[in-house]
Image (cartoon, rainbow, N blue to C red):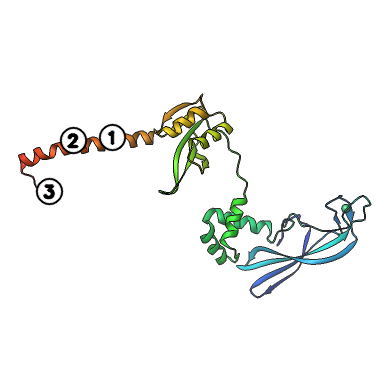
Amino acid sequence: MLLPAGAGLVVEQVQPRDEIVHLTVRCEAAGASCPKCGGWSEAFHSSYERGLGDLPIAVRQAVIDLRVRRFRCYQSNCPRKTFVEQAPVLAGRYAHRTHRLNSMLETTGFSLGGRPGSRHCQRLAMPTSRTTLLRLVRAVPEAPIESPRVLGVDEFAVRRGQRYGTILVDADAHKVVDMLEDPSADALVAWLGEHAGTEVICRDRDGVYANAARRGAPGAVQVADRWHLTHNLAQALERFSGRELAMLRPEWIAKEGMTKWGR
Ligand SMILES: [Zn+2]
């Protein structure tokens, strides 16, 4: 009940010590397979304890003290003289945390980020640092990028006024597909070269992405996106209104004696 099913592990003792619940656990099998040659061995050499951080028990921090044995490998063609048994269902080879704790920390990292996630974990009796949470999030392999049929391209501010990149959006699925740290046309040309199949490129009305789209995906149709069209129209209307208003002002003042313009 306390351990994953089918792990081949036995809980020998559960003991609270200094606010931490310690589970002493051992492997059930009489021997283990050598990781080098695969030969079975029950020839005991020595043993030691591996401390593995685990999910909390009754809102108390928990640690699994896993007793692992070292066996001798007697296979004549094997270069390994000894090896240590593993509990792959519970934790990785050199891990200090169980898979299930890692998975919980990873989810927290994704939901809350580094610092707030770390505070949240502290309250839930899974103390961890913000750097650990961020490292776990970064370690998750990214899903392969599929080339979108309609690709939206725009500039985005990594740090407003200082650092800009390029954001790439699947306009059919309304999903961000990639972000390029380099906002140049060359970076987009390279990306388009690696992700063929784009039929329509939806972009701003500036020349940089137009140039990149021409070079990187010459067969694609280029369109200006709705936001930029509206934005440009709004800017044009503002300039027009400003000019017209400036021309109207002297006439109004003369005719109506208006003083609110400050003249
Ligand atoms: Zn071996």
Mark 3: give few (<14), some (14-19) or many (20+) Cα within 10 Å: few
Q: Which residue is mark 3?
A: 262
Residue 116 appears left or right of 140: left
242 or 51, which is in the foreground?
242
Q: Which residue is mark 2?
A: 244
The residue shown at (23%, 35%) is 240
* 222 shown above or below 28: above
Q: Earlier in the sequence, mark 2 or mark 3?
A: 2
Q: Is residue 220 visible?
A: yes
* 24 shown above or below 151: below
Dot 3: element: loop
Q: Which residue is mark 1?
A: 236
Residue 262 appears left or right of 75: left
Determine the CA span between mark 1 and mark 2: 12 Å
Q: Earlier in the sequence, mark 1 or mark 2?
A: 1
Residue 121 appears left or right of 98: left
Amino acid on which the number 3 mark rests in the picture? Gly
Dot 2: element: helix
Q: Is residue 171 visible?
A: no
The residue shown at (65%, 75%) is 18
Amino acid on which the number 2 mark rests in the picture? Glu
User: Contact (CB < 8 A) between labels 2 and 3?
Assistant: no
Amino acid on which the number 1 mark rests in the picture? Ala
Ligand 1 under 8 Å from disc 2 Cβ: no
